[in-house]
Image (cartoon, helix red, strand yellow):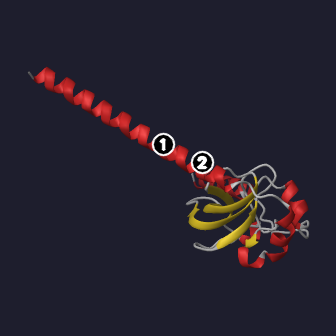
Amino acid sequence: MKKILCSLLAFICLVLICSISKGYACSCSEPAPPLESLEVSKAVFVGKVTDIDRELFGNNETVTLTVSSAWKGISTTEVHVTTSSDEASCGYNFELGKEYLVYTLQDKMETNICTRTSLLSDADEDLAAFQTVELLPNSSFEKMKSESNFLLIVGFALLVIIFVGFGLRWKYKQS
């Protein structure tokens, strides 16, 4: 019996050791100049951090930003960007309430310390380079906001109609 328990314990230890993944430190090359980075990014915008949601189990966090200006890839006033919560995994350390110039990766709304993402107060070189690039119109932000307000009003009106209908039906069943 003792031999079986020792063998089982050894097997469990072997499985645990084999399942441990290797950790790698972040290594980045120098980011491309602002206009080249703009070209290869999925989205580039200025946003203020309104929420940071860290995964309970995992190594990522989702950062919610309110967009004030955008040059590429943004059509709403609120954006959710993911990053690693660990700088050793190249995660960008966002702080609540601060404004950032954000560059996302090519294929997803994710950023890291290898991009040109920075505090807005440290982004003078980028903003100067973007003077020749047309901003996405703010009217599209306002249009999206008014469309979402309209949908909210219509949804609320439908709920009221449904509740009134059920109330009338219940009243007639009672009589």
- Per the image, label 2 sits on a secondary structure element best described as helix
Badge 2 is on which residue? Answer: 143
Point 63% across, 56% down: residue: 80
| Residue 7, position as x, y percentages in the image | 66, 53
Point 78% across, 69% down: residue: 113
Point 53% across, 48% down: residue: 146
Question: Which image quarter: residue 172?
Answer: top left
Question: Which image quarter: residue 39?
Answer: bottom right
Category of crowding for the residue at label 1, using alpha-carbon neighbours closer than 10 angstroms: few (below 14), some (14–19), many (at least 20): few
- Residue 80's place in the image compared with 89, above or below, is above
- Residue 96's place in the image compared with 144, above or below, is below
| Residue 55, position as x, y percentages in the image | 58, 60
Q: Rounded to the nearest whole Å, what is the CA distance between mark 1 and mark 2?
A: 10 Å
Residue 121: in sight, yes or no?
yes
Viewer-nearest residue: 19 or 124: 124
- Per the image, label 1 sits on a secondary structure element best described as helix
Q: Amino acid at mark 1?
A: Phe
Question: Which image quarter: residue 27?
Answer: bottom right
Could you tell which of marks 1 and 2 lies nearer the N-terminus? 2
Residue 8: in sight, yes or no?
no
Label of residue 150 in the image: 1
Q: Amino acid at mark 2?
A: Lys
| Residue 54, position as x, y percentages in the image | 58, 63
| Residue 81, position as x, y percentages in the image | 67, 58
Viewer-nearest residue: 55 or 152: 152
